[in-house]
């Protein structure tokens, strides 16, 4: 980190390699679009590089994910101003083509796991942005409450509240989804 601050580009590249997966994953879950997540992740690292002097210590990962959250917020604002629909968009199951199937699971198990993943992703997108961000940082990226507070600029109590409310809302959304599936004769089992 100190070498990066001193202008050593190779040191910064090492930081990018270390954190690029986490930043992209965070952006993908916040935006639910691969292209927008790639753009937001790239913007995150460009912004981090430009503002290395502003890093005041603490958790570099939390600082970087805060920049990513800001990039995602900017993208969500742009999306609201200019909604778009791509005519070249692949089918709804575009992620399945990239996944390597687990040889230990049956096709039915894989289909159920994939459907559950879609339901969770859709439920995450229903959460308010601040709750979604806190839940993703905690449950998917493993940040501590303190790191999330540092990353979001929120107090510890606010972080705990957002996570608690976000998890409760996710639970509600997923239970409703399960009940809807039970009522559909096609999904009865």
Image: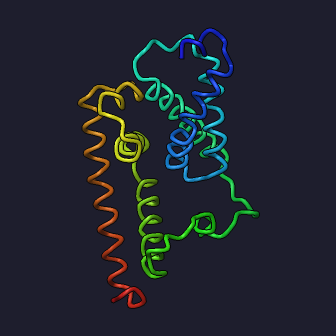
Residue 74 lies, with reference to residue 84, above or below; the image says above
Residue 176 lies, with reference to residue 68, above or below; the image says below
- For the residue pair 23 and 177, the one nearer the viewer reads as 23
Q: Position of residue 5 (x, y in %)?
A: 59, 12
- For the residue pair 35 and 183, the one nearer the viewer reads as 35
Q: Position of residue 157 (x, y in %)?
A: 23, 30
User: Tag count in the figure?
Assistant: 0
Residue 161's quadrant in the figure? Answer: top left
**Residue at figure coordinates x 33%, y 89% from the top left:** 189
**Residue at figure coordinates x 54%, y 35% from the top left:** 19
Residue 141's quadrant in the figure? Answer: top left
**Residue at figure coordinates x 37%, y 79% from the top left:** 181
In the picture, measured across the screen, residue 144 lies left or right of residue 79, that is left
Check the picture and name the quadrant holding the N terminus. Answer: top right
Q: Position of residue 102 (x, y in %)?
A: 49, 70
In the picture, measured across the screen, residue 85 lies left or right of residue 155, that is right
In the picture, measured across the screen, residue 2 lies left or right of residue 57, that is right
- Residue furthest front in the image: 103
**Which colouring convention does the figure follow?**
rainbow
Q: Position of residue 162 (x, y in %)?
A: 30, 40
**Residue at figure coordinates x 62%, y 29% from the top left:** 45
- For the residue pair 137 and 160, the one nearer the viewer reads as 137
């Amino acid at each position: 980190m100190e070498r990066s601050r001193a202008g050593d580009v190779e040191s910064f590249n090492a930081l990018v390699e270390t954190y690029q997966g986490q930043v992209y994953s965070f952006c993908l879950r916040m935006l639910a679009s691969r292209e927008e997540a790639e753009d937001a992740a790239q913007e995150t690292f460009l912004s981090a590089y430009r503002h290395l002097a502003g890093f005041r210590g603490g958790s570099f990962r939390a600082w970087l994910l805060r920049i990513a959250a800001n990039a995602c917020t900017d993208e969500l604002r742009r999306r609201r101003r200019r909604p778009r629909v791509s005519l070249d968009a692949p089918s709804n199951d575009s992620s399945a083509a990239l996944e390597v199937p687990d040889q230990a699971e049956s096709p039915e198990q894989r289909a159920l796991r994939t459907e559950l993943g879609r339901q969770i992703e859709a439920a995450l997108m229903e959460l308010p942005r601040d709750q979604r961000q806190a839940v993703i940082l905690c449950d998917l990226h493993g940040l501590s409450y303190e790191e999330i507070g540092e990353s979001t600029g929120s107090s510890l109590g606010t972080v705990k509240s957002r996570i608690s409310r976000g998890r409760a809302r996710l639970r509600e959304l997923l239970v409703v989804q399960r009940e809807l599936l039970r009522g559909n004769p096609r999904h009865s089992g």
